[in-house]
């Protein structure tokens, strides 16, 4: 009986490699503001880094191909009267970037393709609505000109960047400072973490919390949360003994967008079938479907999955929970939905740990750790469309040092095929039969005799 010892995975041997010295960005004064953000944002065209500047906040924008030493007189993007706390590139336009500052404003900038001669001081639009500093920005993943901001006033505001108006203001959901906000893949839900140690799932269209979990991590240090492609929530935080911890949660029960609805379901395209006892189909909300009247007893769009899901116990028990180490740095999770790998980068650490999230126990599988000598002050994560897939590159980070930015490339190794080693290209020698002394001798060369 065969027994599988090693887990099968395409990404089990992923390794990280730092770029060469001539491919780094040097002589950059990275900001020293004490704020738990990445301080770096990157897209296939530009690299943006929050830097030290006198008389307000600023960040520098460099073309991605312009490596080496940065001129000390390189133009900056200035306009905030306070330190810049967070920046984020628009996923629908590589020339548009948003910045949040301690001066309670959010500014949206248009970056030209050419290198400007002077500092960029005039934003496209200034968004004013927060009463305290703004430290979190996140663009909507599917809708254009929709930007989310969260500030120290415990308010989440969703803006229409094109007109500057407030689309939605969530001001009664969080009693304390918001630590992180993350959209799901289609922008229908928000995962938020707060200083009150509560993990919340928010439906922004209804303006209410649809699921929550108190003390997902029992420590008082900041917690982070991101959605996975299966709808689970991956979190990083601290234990009561200040050990860093990661967790995976499955918020099925109260999530209306997951399709936990009463009554039967139209399962698939043809047969109308009720759900088994204690089960529900993971589709749309409350049995309401855009093809049937509201309220509907049957949902006719059960097309995302062909299997029933069990009703779980609403955050009461984590899918996975692992303790890591006793470092003080907050772990910033960067999730890749294509490979289902999450990368954990701690501020002040000198390593990047990465895990694979699967549907098999223990669900969160440790892969490897990339280590370097110098600690990181921030990290930028390149979108998948900016990678060189011809070299088997699956992720690229931009690590911020005190005075430079260093690219780190994550690669899946692949075996090379050569004529000397590959049996497909090497032809076997021709073999013939030669009669000698009444017997047949098998030789490879027809001219050889024995």
Image: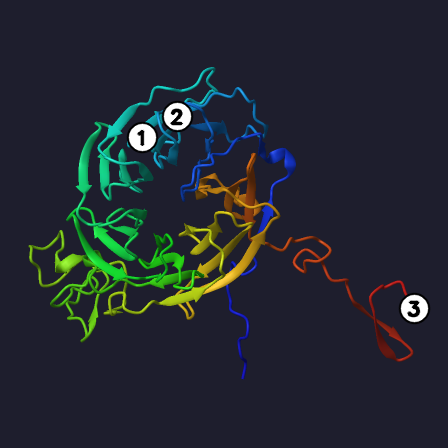
Q: Quadrant of residue 245?
A: bottom left
Tag 2–tag 3 contact (CB < 8 Å): no
Q: Quadrant of the N terminus?
A: bottom right
Tag 2–tag 1 contact (CB < 8 Å): yes
10 Å neighbourhood of mark 2: few (<14), some, or many (≥20)?
some
Q: Nearer the viewer, residue 432 or 345?
A: 345
10 Å neighbourhood of mark 1: few (<14), some, or many (≥20)?
many
Foreground tag (3 vs 1): 1
**Residue 56, disc:** 2
Determine which residue is flagged by label 3: 449
Q: Nearer the viewer, residue 79 or 16?
A: 79
Q: What residue is at 46 percent from the left and 60 percent from the top?
A: 356
Q: What residue is at 80 percent from the left and 68 percent from the top?
A: 432
**Residue 241, disc:** none
From the top left corner, tell me how far across and down residue 17 is, in percent.
60, 47
10 Å neighbourhood of mark 3: few (<14), some, or many (≥20)?
few
Q: What residue is at 37 percent from the left and 19 percent from the top?
A: 121
What is the secondary structure assignment of the residue under circle 2? loop
From the top left corner, tell me how far across and down residue 192 is, in percent.
29, 51
Give the distance between the C-alpha atoms of the residues marked 2 and 1, in whole angstroms: 9 Å
**Residue 103, disc:** 1
What is the secondary structure assignment of the residue under circle 1? loop
Residue sticking out furthest to the bottom: 1
Foreground tag (2 vs 3): 2
270 shown above or below 205: below
Residue sticking out furthest to the top: 117
- Say if residue 87 shows up in the picture: no
From the top left corner, tell me how far across and down residue 126 is, in percent.
27, 26
From the top left corner, tell me how far across and down residue 338 is, in percent.
42, 52
Q: Earlier in the sequence, mark 2 or mark 3?
A: 2
Q: Earlier in the sequence, mark 2 or mark 1?
A: 2
């Amino acid at each position: 009986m065969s027994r599988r010892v090693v887990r099968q995975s395409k990404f089990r041997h992923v390794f990280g490699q730092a770029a060469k010295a001539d491919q780094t960005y040097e002589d950059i004064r990275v900001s020293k503001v004490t704020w738990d953000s990445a301080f770096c944002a990157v897209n296939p065209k530009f690299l943006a880094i929050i830097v030290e500047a006198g008389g307000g906040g600023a960040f520098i924008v460099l073309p991605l191909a312009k490596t080496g030493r940065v001129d000390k007189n390189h133009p900056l993007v200035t306009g905030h009267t306070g330190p810049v706390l967070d920046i984020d590139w628009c996923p629908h336009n590589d020339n548009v970037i948003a910045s949040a500052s301690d001066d309670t404003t959010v500014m949206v900038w248009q970056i030209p393709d050419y290198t400007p001669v002077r500092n960029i001081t005039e934003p496209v639009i200034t968004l004013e609505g927060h009463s305290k500093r703004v430290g979190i920005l996140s663009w909507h993943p599917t809708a254009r000109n929709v930007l989310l901001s969260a500030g120290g006033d415990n308010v989440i505001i969703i803006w229409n960047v094109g007109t500057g108006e407030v689309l939605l203001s969530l001001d009664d959901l969080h009693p304390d400072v918001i630590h992180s906000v993350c959209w799901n893949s289609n922008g229908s839900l928000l995962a938020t973490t707060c200083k009150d140690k509560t993990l919340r799932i928010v439906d922004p269209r209804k303006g209410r919390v649809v699921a929550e979990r108190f003390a997902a991590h029992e420590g008082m240090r900041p917690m982070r949360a991101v959605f996975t492609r299966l709808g689970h929530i991956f979190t990083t935080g601290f234990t009561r003994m200040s050990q860093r911890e990661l967790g995976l949660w499955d918020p099925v029960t109260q999530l209306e967008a997951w399709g936990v609805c009463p009554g039967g379901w139209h399962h698939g395209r043809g047969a109308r079938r009720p759900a088994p006892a204690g089960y529900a189909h993971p589709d749309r909300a409350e049995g309401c479907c855009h093809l049937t009247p509201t309220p509907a007893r049957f949902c006719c769009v059960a097309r995302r999955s062909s299997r029933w899901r069990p009703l779980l116990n609403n955050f009461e028990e984590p899918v996975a929970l692992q303790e890591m180490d006793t470092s003080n740095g907050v772990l910033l999770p960067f999730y890749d939905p294509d490979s289902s790998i999450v990368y954990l980068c701690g501020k002040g650490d000198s390593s990047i740990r990465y895990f694979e999230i699967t549907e098999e126990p223990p669900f969160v599988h440790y892969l490897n750790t990339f280590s370097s000598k110098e600690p990181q002050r921030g990290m930028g994560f390149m979108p998948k469309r900016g990678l060189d897939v011809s070299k088997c590159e699956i992720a690229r980070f931009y690590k911020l040092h005190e005075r430079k930015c260093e690219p780190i490339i994550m690669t899946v190794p692949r075996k090379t095929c050569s004529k000397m080693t590959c049996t497909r290209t090497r032809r076997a020698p021709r073999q013939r039969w030669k009669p000698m002394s009444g017997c047949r001798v098998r030789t490879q060369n027809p001219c050889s005799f024995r």
